[in-house]
Image: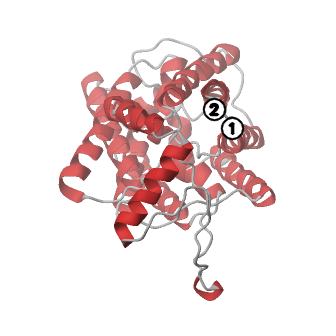
Amino acid sequence: MVRTRGGFLLVAILAGLVLGFTLSMIGFGDFAQLNAMFTFQDLRMLFAFAGAVGLIAVTFLLLRVRRGTSRIHAGVVPGAILFGAGWAVSGGCPGIPLVQISTGYLPAVFTIAGVAVGIRMCRWANGRFFHLDRGSCGL
Amino acid sequence: MSAYWPWWAGALGLAAVTVFYTLTTDRSLGLSGAWDRILHWREEREIERMDEALADDDALAEALAQATAAEFGTVPARSGSLPAAPVPTAERPEPQPAVPARPAPLVTQAALIVSTVIGGLIAALVSGRFQVRFDMGEGFRQLVTGNPIGMIVILFAGGVLVGFGTRLAGGCSSGHGLSGCGRLRPVSFLATAVFFGTAVAVSFLLWKVV
């Protein structure tokens, strides 16, 4: 396990490079491919995602990786509904517009701008109105 | 232009990244979380500074002992020693998993985002798919809109939904979908089922109706 900030930085850079490369090679940045996956016309990307989850689950079970907290907080279902709708119309789960930009789809900057506004709105609105525990995924 | 990868190559790639990141850092890979922290970098820097001030283990143990003493009105135990009164075995709580003390350093999350762009660029160049365009491709034009203004509005609005929704749900397709489902967390299965289900419904609407 990495102990230093420099080691962590190296891991993050490597992970990002492989993630961006893989997402692009699978075709997640291609809106037609994405719609074909969500409408079950082409199961290739669906199998790629589900296969990854299966491989990760088996590896984590074998290596006894901790599961972490698993409380179902109040934001899960409404948040996931908003996210799913946004993903289907814009083609962007927060990593995909990055890959779209690097494939040359310049309008994806508007998706990224929207994501940035939405993320800032969420923390602001949650602190002010909802006071939901949003979990700690990604920490 | 080469074809897209077969499903098993994609599965191997995504799994390799997630497993590598998790095992080396003991944290979950999550892009929406990375975005969230970068976009709130002022607050996050402040938290990192406070954490660094507490990084000295002795100082932390001392502070905890003091806080415990204040809470229960007992004399603080000398730091480093175990609690004197053992809890009866039957009532002992489940051992808590070792949660990482601190979130990933902010700079690493920025590096993750930047290198994702570079990784995508390498893939686009290698596969011959790189082409600068002012639209989102034929699929988007047919399924959503061909109007440039409409496209900008929909991309931006969709992005807001994605940003708001992922943070409200506590994760996205990488955090809940890959890391969370891989850890067999019920909350991640629920989130993934709901966002995937919604995306399926909306995609059918785009395909069949609009």
Task: Give the number of the disc on residue B17.
Answer: 1
| Residue wearing tag 2 | A19
Seen at 58% across and 22% down, the residue is B115
Q: In which quarter of the image is the N terminus of chain B?
A: top right
The amino acid at mark 1 is Val
Does residue A65 lie above or below B163 as drawn? Answer: below
**Where does residue A3 sit, x and y in percent of width and height?**
67, 34
Residue in the foreground of this view, choosing between B144 and A4: A4
Q: Residues within 10 Å of mark 2 (few under 14, many from 20)?
A: many
Label 2 sits on a secondary structure element that is helix
Does residue B139 lie above or below A58 as drawn? Answer: above
Seen at 25% across and 24% down, the residue is B149
Q: Can residue B142 be seen in this view?
A: no
**Where does residue A81 sit, x and y in percent of width and height?**
37, 56
The amino acid at mark 2 is Leu
Contact between marks 2 and 1 (CB within 8 A): the answer is yes
